[in-house]
Amino acid sequence: MTTTTVAAPTPRDVRPPRRGASLERRRQRIGWLFVTPFLVVFAGFLVFPLAYAFGMSLFTSTLATGTRFTGAANYVKAFTDPLFLEGLLRVAAYALVMIPAQLIVALAAALVLDTLATRLSQLSRLLIFAPYAIPVVIGALMWSFLYSPRFGPAGTLFDVVGLPTPDFLASDTVFGSLVNIVTWQWSGYYMIVIYAALRSIDPAIYEAARIDGANGWQTALRIKVPMISSSMVMVVTFALIGTLQFFTEPVVLRNVAQGAIDAAYTPNMYAFSLAFSYSQFNYASTIAFSLGILVFAGSYVFLFLTRKQSGLK
Amino acid sequence: MTTAIGARSAPDALTTVTGLPDHADHSAGRSRRRDRRIGSHVFLVILAIYFLVPIWWLFVASTKSTSGLFSSPAFWFDDPAQFFANVQGLFTHQGGIYWRWLGNSFLYAFVGGSGATVLAILAGYGFAKYRFRGRGAVFGVILGSIMVPLTALVVPTFMLLSQYGLINTPWAVILPSLLSPFGVYLMRVYTQDAVPDEMLEAARIDGAGEWRTFFQVALPLLKPAIVTVLLLSIVGTWNNFFLPLAVLTDSQLLPVTVGLNRWTALSNAGAGGEQVWNLITSGAFISVVPLILSFLFLQRYWQGGLAIGSVK
């Protein structure tokens, strides 16, 4: 991932040797000046908190003994803690369902949009994207209203058909309800990313394919999809990172579905409740740090496996 | 829908298997193409309805009283004039705290988002156009950090900020929002292509200093990327829920997202005087209008800009 960008050659002109050396030093300094403000924030709010969390996770604090160094004990506890492990399995299950759902909607919409240039298609593109402009909390609130048996339209709709109204917030249906919220919220954004990548393909390729006798369907699947695989890898990576740290939607839905969503529903919710309901900051840090490492490792493995498609080496 | 399109293109697939596309059958081909265009539009309209319906619902619901929310059809108006009563309610309920929340959201999103963008522009330009020792290693670490889930940092950030006495101040939300490794990545990739080295050299030969070269030559070329990174970071901060939920407890400081969630939790808890469903729906509606409008007006910038990181 790094090497490609680093190896990118920067053309340098030929300079007179002696003056060049001091100029080069000056340029070096100015380069650092440009990146330093960001690096300060990066150190303060990423590197330092991560190191701090790791440090905290090595200690255990109890009323009886005070704070003492316990090494890897918290990690042993975390990876044998059924609440944490269930949470991990749950977000993994969400990732398996939610990411394909979002990708299919986004890809299908982008491929169809790419073949059309009408007013209606432009309007649809904006409408499909619109949920991205709505904060996740508000989106989840809206859906929790729509799911609600008290306000929701479902009751009326199902009465018309003569069927019993399903409870969208029961423990066996809440999974699908959350998948729907996330798909609704993010597919449009991913669609725009994929659509923009499609627009950047040279149309001459389609002409060549058409002359070779490929129809629209074949052009889409055999030419367009492979050519935009790098942006699809990016979309899946973002969706993966987002899903594994699932937090906002279940927290908001928990307002109306206490029975179906418990306080440790996802690892992030577990860390939050450990820290802010039980003041177990050392153990909460362990959970947060473990989740961070797992997400990092997961996306790294994914990028490694797809390095051919993404063009990253 | 998808299957219908698939079925319709099946005959095409058959003709091409023979290697001899049927050129004689022009009129049939054209009508088939028209069918497919209609099919595509139907597919898009169905998708658009799915994405629009909840927003339409919010719009309609923002014009209802609490009893209207319970009794009237979900997707149609009850008494539209009620909207003004709701807005008035937002001004009076808990001393008009809703507007304070909205103001807080603007402040955090604007200061955090602009700050993050400025840092990303400077760093992206530095990484793209200067070869300094350690550049590769540092940029590699930043790229890797895109994959660190930011929510994993919330609990440790809370503990750090509380050591410096910054909990329950606006800084607790703004400072961590300045961090945008993805913004730096986008700016670097974009700068590399959009700002030719020759142009910078020419400016330097003409006697412009490094800063002047940056401000007058490079910056104007970076406009689409700047708008995109700005929008992304403002949306990111505006969206933020986990961080303010953790670091702010003073209700005067909450952003609108956390505030409305608090109202919902109270209303669901059921105490009669706390049920403000009409204020939640109208408050939520008013809070989404500014962002939707800015996306609408800035379309031509972000639509291209969002692809920066992904198109090679």
Image (cartoon, rainbow, N blue to C red):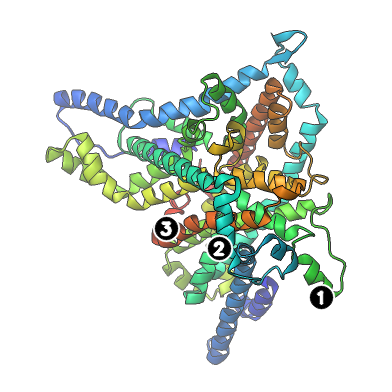
Is residue B224 visible in the rendered structure shown here? Answer: yes
Q: Residue at x 35, y 25 (%)?
A: B133
Q: Residue at x 23, y 25 (%)?
A: A26
Mark 2, residues whose alpha carbon is within 10 Å: few (<14), some, or many (≥20)?
some
The chain holding disc 1 is: A
Q: CA distance from mark 2 to mark 1?
A: 33 Å
What residue did someone put label 1 on? A160
Residue type, label 2? Phe
The answer to whether A268 appears left or right of B176 in the picture is: right
Marks 2 and 1 in Cβ contact (< 8 Å): no
- Residue B206, given in percent of the width and then of the height, sits at 12, 41
What residue did someone put label 3 on? B304
| First along the sequence among labels 2 and 3 | 2
Place residue A105 in its image quadrant.
Answer: bottom right
- Local secondary structure at mark 1: helix
> Is B307 in front, or is B169?
B169
The chain holding disc 2 is: B
What residue did someone put label 2 on? B84
Q: CA distance from mark 3 to mark 1?
A: 45 Å
Q: Residue at x 28, y 25 (%)?
A: A29
Marks 2 and 1 share the same chain: no
Q: Residue at x 39, y 61 (%)?
A: B300
Is residue A250 visible in the rendered structure shown here? Answer: no
The answer to whether A290 appears left or right of A35 in the picture is: right
- Residue B248, given in percent of the width and then of the height, sits at 58, 33
